[in-house]
Image: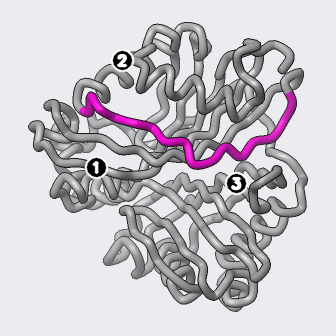
Amino acid sequence: MKGFSDKFKDFPDYILGITKEIWEDRGLATLNHYYSKDIPVRSPGSIVFGNDGVIAATMATLAEFPDRRLLGEDVIWSGSPEEGMLSSHRILTTATHLGDGVYGKASGKKLRYRVIADCHAINNQINDEWLIRDQGAVVRQLGWDPREYAIDLIEREGGHEKCIQPFHPSIDKTGPYTGRGNDNDWGEKYSDILNRIMSADLNVIPIEYDRAVTGFYPGGSELYSSDGVDGFWTKLRAAFPSATFSIDHQIGREDPLMPPRAAIRWSLTGKHDGWGAFGKPTGAEVHVMGASHVEFGPWGIRREYTLYDETSIWKQIAMKTG
């Protein structure tokens, strides 16, 4: 790969390799090399700029979860080494809560949860990132309810006027990567499916999903069959019926030994004005940053992985309602 170290055979190998090097091999100092100095990192909970913040957050997480492992399940990517490449990296994380930190006193509890990180890389360096962690799964395994955790977090951060503001497009700043992915047919197909679901065309689900589909969703939940898929998406959309749905990035791929796949980063922006996944309507202005991966089979989508941060959504609601 032009511009990248010869020790990486291809782009997925680069993403998987540096992730292990940084986290499991304790190579935090390599972040000064692998991440650009002024990188913007967007997550549902905030937007931060600069590699110093990335290093500090990584160290804090390792202090709280020293045995954390990041098992790369897939890297769905687009672009070229010359123009830059965007990876959507799906990670299954395992960790033990062995240190005090943002999640409270060390509990010794073992965790398992997923993360999807979209990273832009060029010349052996990542310079733009979108990161979604299944915070709902994390806090549930530590004994918290996501809503209660969000309220407690607001209080610990100084109240709704002083607390860290969750990410919203209004506070975003354009980074080095302004691409939209690729025009592969599988990405186009999945994009069309999501747009139809969000437009209340729920009949698309039994048509385009395998009857034996498995869905892996926020909170660490696993739902089965097209009925499970229908329930998940319907409850989310019902909570924000007037919100604007947007496909923000789209990749489709076909690779050897792999099923056709797609990675979509999407968002819902608008009012919490319906009964659904987030309880009684409050009218709060909410931005949902979401990411989804799917694998296609002979009878439609066989596996779907979707993440958003429940605690960030509850935080936005609580900041409105008190």
Q: Position of residue 285 (x, y in %)?
A: 45, 58
Q: Which residue is mark 3?
A: 263
Please report the residue visible at 63 percent of the width from the left and 64 percent of the height from the top.
Answer: 244
Find numbered disc 2 in the image and state the secondary structure of the residue it sits on.
helix
Task: Say what secondary structure mark 3 lies in.
Answer: strand
Q: Residue at x 26, y 33 (%)?
A: 65
Residue nearer the viewer, 149 or 123: 123
Please, is residue 232 above or below residue 115 in the view? below
Q: Earlier in the sequence, mark 2 or mark 1?
A: 2
- Residue that badge 2 annotates: 56
- Residue at image position (52%, 14%) is 31
For mark 1, give the secondary structure: strand
Give the percent coordinates (x, y) of residue 189. 82, 68
Q: Residue at point 44% right, 79% down? A: 274
Marked residue nearer the N-terminal end (3 or 1): 1
Between 120 and 225, which is closer to the camera in this rendering? 225
* Amino acid under disc 3: Ala
Q: Is residue 104 above or below residue 54?
A: below
The disc labelled 2 sits on which kind of residue? Ala
Residue 241 visible at all: no
Residue holding disc 1: 111
Magenta part of the protein: which range?
Answer: 65-80
- Amino acid under label 1? Leu
Please tell me whether residue 209 belongs to the stretch shown in magenta: no
Q: Nearer the viewer, mark 3 or mark 1?
A: 1
44 sits left or right of 204 in the view: left
Of badges 2 and 1, nearer the viewer stands 1
Q: Residues within 10 Å of mark 1 (few under 14, many from 20)?
A: some
Left or right: residue 296 compared with residue 278: right
Q: Are marks 3 and 2 in contact (CB under 8 Å)?
A: no
For the C terminus, the quadrant is bottom left
Comparing 243 with 227, the one in front is: 227
